[in-house]
Image (tube, helix red, strand yellow):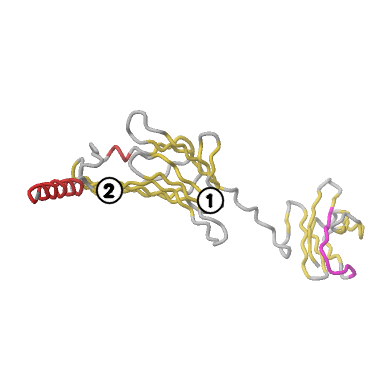
């Protein structure tokens, strides 16, 4: 009986030792954008494991037909990282170029990928990649083996904001300019002999004042109550200029 137990113990120990020597493997692919707001989830797309399947995504990522899409604010960036760590007979890799070709840019501005790590042999390596995506693009993720699933990622960015013209600066054209030079003065600069009409409106479109003037003028608007107004100038040559101002 003792001999039977001892034999069973040796077999079990050898099996455990064999499992230990099988190897340690880990791999992953990640796209990440931090929202910068605790109330808004971060944007994340990931594939875990050497098979690169079972995609997980949340935040702004969504799938449209067969393409995973994300739209980021203007000026932001999307971080890419991937890694392959192997120490033992768990996922043999013939050469490091197999993981280097995981991404194929299909449209848009290519991004540079930094490759790091070491490749000792087919069962002993630790490789990683990282990149910063700052421009709109479409790329494919696919393991470099026959029949591997392809994933398509489209990265888009919002349009840049349209700068607002400060109310205290002149809006200038080739022949006429108009600005609020003080709290009670609307200044119009034009040719000395130019005749032009000035119409003042409320935001609702109601006309408040109408004047015909000549040359550069400072128009007194002190009789207007505090609020937001629209001044529209039209010249004899058909030129028109409009200014929205707050008094």
> Residue 36: image x %, image y %?
53, 60
* Residue lying furthest left: 3
Relative to 65, residue 168 above or below: below
* Residue at 83% in and 70% down: 184
* Residue at 60% in and 48% down: 159
Q: Quadrant of the C terminus?
A: bottom right
Q: Report whether 183 appears left or right of 161.
A: right
Which residue was labeled with disc 1?
59
Q: Report whether 92 appears left or right of 11.
A: right
Instruction: Write the start and end of the magenta stretch as one range.
Output: 223-233
Where disc 1 sits, the SS reads loop
Which of the pair 88/61 is nearer the observer? Answer: 88
Q: Is residue 228 magenta?
A: yes
Mark 2 surroundings: few (<14), some (14-19) or many (≥20) residues within 10 A: many
Q: Is residue 66 magenta?
A: no
Where disc 2 sits, the SS reads strand
């Amino acid at each position: 009986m003792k001999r039977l137990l001892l034999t069973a113990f040796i077999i079990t120990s050898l099996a455990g030792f064999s499992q230990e020597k099988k190897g340690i493997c880990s791999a992953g692919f990640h796209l990440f954008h931090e929202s910068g707001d605790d109330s808004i989830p971060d944007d994340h797309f990931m594939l875990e494991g050497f098979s690169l399947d079972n995609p997980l995504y949340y935040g702004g990522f969504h799938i449209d037909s067969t393409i995973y899409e994300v739209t980021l604010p203007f000026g932001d960036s999307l971080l890419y990282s991937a890694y392959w760590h192997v120490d033992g007979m768990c996922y043999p890799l013939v050469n490091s170029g197999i993981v280097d070709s995981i991404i194929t840019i299909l449209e848009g501005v290519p991004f540079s990928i930094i490759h790091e790590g070491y490749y000792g042999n087919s069962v002993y390596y630790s490789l990683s990649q990282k990149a910063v995506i700052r421009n709109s693009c479409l790329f494919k993720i696919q393991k470099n083996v026959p029949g591997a699933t392809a994933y398509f990622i489209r990265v888009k960015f919002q349009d840049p904001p349209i700068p607002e013209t400060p109310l205290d600066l002149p809006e200038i054209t080739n022949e006429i300019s108009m600005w609020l030079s003080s709290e009670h003065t609307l200044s119009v600069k034009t040719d000395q002999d130019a005749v032009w009409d000035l119409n003042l409106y409320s935001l609702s479109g109601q006309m408040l004042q109408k004047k015909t003037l000549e040359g550069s003028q400072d128009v007194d608007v002190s009789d207007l109550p505090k609020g937001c107004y629209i001044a529209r100038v039209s010249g004899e040559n058909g030129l028109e200029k409009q200014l929205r101002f707050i008094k």
